[in-house]
Amino acid sequence: MIDLAAYAGLFFSALVAATILPMQSEAVLAGLLVAGAQPAVLLIAIASAGNVLGSVVNWWLGRFVERYADRSWFPASPVRLARAQDWYRRYGKWSLLLSWAPVIGDPLTLVAGVMREPFPVFLLLVTLAKLGRYLVLAAIVLNVM
């Protein structure tokens, strides 16, 4: 039961951390890795799956969010939205390899949805980025590097 709670907590923290809500999944993963009660490979897989799913939520929201740009509660001004779209047009799908990065990663996945990035391409690039980040973190925490 403890393992299930640890896995669920890690998955949930990674999922929420990938959305626009503030959350820290790296600390949860690092703590579980240091504790050593669960296999590192499984922890990395669960964190990656949750984080990718959170990015998929952002992509999906991006597909529909632009229709609400004229509302007062919309979180980005038209200028900021246009700037983000221009940035994505300039750097394209390869910018999704930065989806792991703090501050820019989560909005980038939302903009990919706004820009109608095909889902298979989005999923592949985001999965590579998120998995890579967790692999590096695990290697540092476990002193493998």
Image: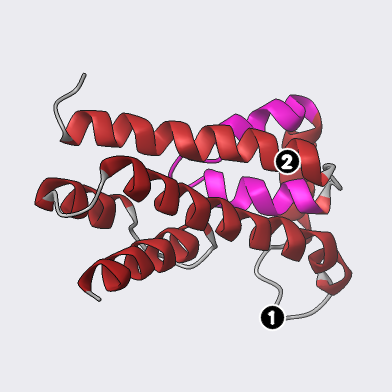
> Where's the N terminus, which quadrant?
bottom left
Q: How is the image coloured?
A: secondary structure
What is the quadrant of residue 7 in the picture?
A: bottom left
Residue for point 75% across, 54% down:
81
Q: Residue furthest top?
A: 145
Q: Secondary structure at mark 2?
A: helix
Q: Which residue is mark 2?
A: 122
Determine which of the numbered discs, if any, sits on residue 127 in the image.
Answer: none
Q: Is residue 10 left or right of residue 99?
A: left
Q: Per the image, is 67 magenta?
A: no
Q: Which residue is mark 1?
A: 73
Query: Is residue 4 or residue 127 the one in the foreground?
Result: 4
Query: Is residue 144 or residue 22 the one in the foreground?
Result: 144
Residue for point 85% across, 42% down:
118
Q: In this rendering, is residue 3 above or below 120? A: below
What is the quadrant of residue 142 in the picture?
A: top left
Q: Position of residue 132 (x, y in %)?
A: 45, 31
Asked whether the beta carbons under mark 2 and mark 1 sit within 8 Å of each other, the answer is no
Residue for point 59% across, 58% down:
53
> Where's the C terminus, which quadrant?
top left
- Identify residue type, mark 2: Phe
Q: Nearer the viewer, mark 2 or mark 1?
A: 2
What range of the chain is rendered magenta?
90-113
